[in-house]
Image: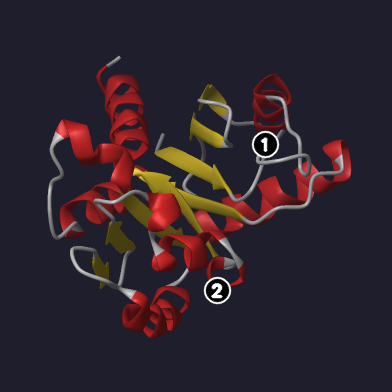
Amino acid sequence: MPRFVALLRGVNVGKGNRLAMADFKAVLEGLGYTDVSTLLNSGNAVFTGSGRSSRRHAASIATALEKELAVTTLVIVKSAAELSAVIGASPITPPQADQSRYLVAFAAAAQELHALQRLQDLARAPERFVVTSVAAFLHCPAGVLKSRIGGALLGHAGRRVTTRSWATVMKLRARVDAARRG
């Protein structure tokens, strides 16, 4: 059965949208997913599910989170193959020391990523912002909080995407790959 990654936007940030990862895992298991594991405290999970589309998984998870836990959030699901495509599309492979300053923006559809192109004007050297059909990538050597694009992605302009650091993306890939080998 295929492996998937679920990414929630804006949970456990500040006081709103609090979600215990044990509850998130229970919701996923309640939907019939297996081999569920969560990563960090920011709404990341890896699971095995039937061959349904990523969008259908995302819709089911979003509905269950709202119904069972009163958590309303954007849910993006990527299959193992889609996650690999995102990683492969990265314009750089940041060194270990820079992985927290390299963000990947995930979206459910290419048009949501395309809408991020307008943020390009906010880039200030040495920042680099690249939008592809599978993800958007932001390298902000001065740090995410000093980046105008980083702020926009975390705010209203990025409401249809969710971002993860490269380090988190690599941890998710390792979980997906470990489950496939096991």
Mark 1 or mark 2, which has the lower sequence index? 1
Q: Is residue 30 left or right of residue 102?
A: right
Location of residue 29 in the rendering, given as x and y in whole percent from the top left corner: 66, 26
Quarter occupied by residue 99: top left
Residue 43 at what x, y percent from top left?
A: 58, 37
Query: Mark 1 belongs to which amino acid?
Result: Asn
**Location of residue 75 in the rendering, given as x and y in whole percent from the top left corner:** 61, 52
Looking at this view, is 80 or 148 the one in front?
148
Disc 2 marks a residue whose amino acid type is: Ala
| Secondary structure of the residue carrying numbered label 2 | helix
Location of the C terminus by quadrant is top left
Residue in view at x 43 percent, y 58 percent:
106
Figure colour scheme: secondary structure
On residue 145, the disc is none
98 relative to 58 in the view: left or right = left
Crowd tier of the residue under label 2, counting other residues whose Cα lies within 10 Å: few below 14, some 14–19, many 20 or above? some
24 relative to 68 in the view: left or right: left
Q: Quadrant of residue 74?
A: bottom right
Residue at 42 percent of width and 67 percent of height: 148
* Residue 108 seen in render: no
**x, y (%) of residue 11?**
66, 42
Residue 12 badge: 1
Label 2 sits on residue: 157
Which residue in the rendered view is the most extreme toward the top? 182
**Could you tell me how far apart the alpha carbons at marks 1 and 2 are, in whole angstroms?**
20 Å
Q: How many marks?
A: 2
Up-down: is 66 above or below 40?
below
Point out the image quarter for the N terminus: top left
Q: Disc 1 on helix, strand or loop?
A: loop
Residue 49 vs 128, above or below: the answer is above
